[in-house]
Image: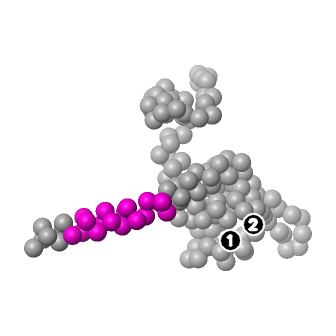
Amino acid sequence: MSQRNTAVPEQLRTLDDARAMIEQGLCPIPPREILDKIAGKWAIQIVVAASEGPVRFTHLERLIEGISRRMLTLTLRNLERDGLLERTVYPTVPPKVEYQATPMALELYEAMLTLTNWSIKHSACVAASRQRYDTRQEAVAL
């Protein structure tokens, strides 16, 4: 198997830079696959909770409304596997397990905050656009 340079620049300047890296095979995992994993409703909530400091499984279970124990376990494993969470097991009886966001997850958290702030900033514009669209659609339907 050939070896190639898989170093990724700290920050891409343009979307074209990202596309070029993908085309050259410099991204070992397709970006879409990673985005699909981190965009799930459970993963986002877990990353946000773990970004505030170490968090225990039971606390996550109480904090994330509607998540089953199985789904929480699977999501935690996937986030740990992808390098977004660190799992620490303390040798106590019963065992104490904590999850903490890695530096990579903290960077993702900052990006999520940017996206959240954007949505807050533009929520009135989106609401107005929806209203205009719905009014036009109602007029066409009549």
Secondary structure beneath label 2: strand
Q: Are marks 2 and 1 in contact (CB under 8 Å)?
A: yes
Residue bearing the label numbered 2: 55
Kindly indicate the quadrant of the structure image that contains residue 128: bottom left
- Residue 107 sits above or below residue 120 on the image: above
Q: Is residue 1 left or right of residue 87?
A: left
Q: Is residue 14 left or right of residue 57?
A: left
Residue in the image at 53% along x and 64% along y: 41
- What segment carries the magenta color? 119-135
Residue 81 locus on image (x, y percent): 66, 51
Kindly indicate the quadrant of the structure image that contains residue 56: bottom right
Give the overall secondary structure of the magenta segment: helix
Instruction: Pick the residue in front: 117 or 81.
Output: 117
Q: How is the image coloured?
A: one colour
Q: Is residue 40 visible?
A: no
Residue 44 locus on image (x, y percent): 58, 61
Secondary structure beneath label 1: helix
Identify the mark at residue 60; answer none if there is no mark. Answer: 1
**Inter-mark Cα distance, 2 to 1:** 7 Å
Residue type at mark 1?
Leu
Residue 37 locus on image (x, y percent): 54, 54
Residue in the image at 50% along x and 42% along y: 31
Q: Is residue 109 visible?
A: yes
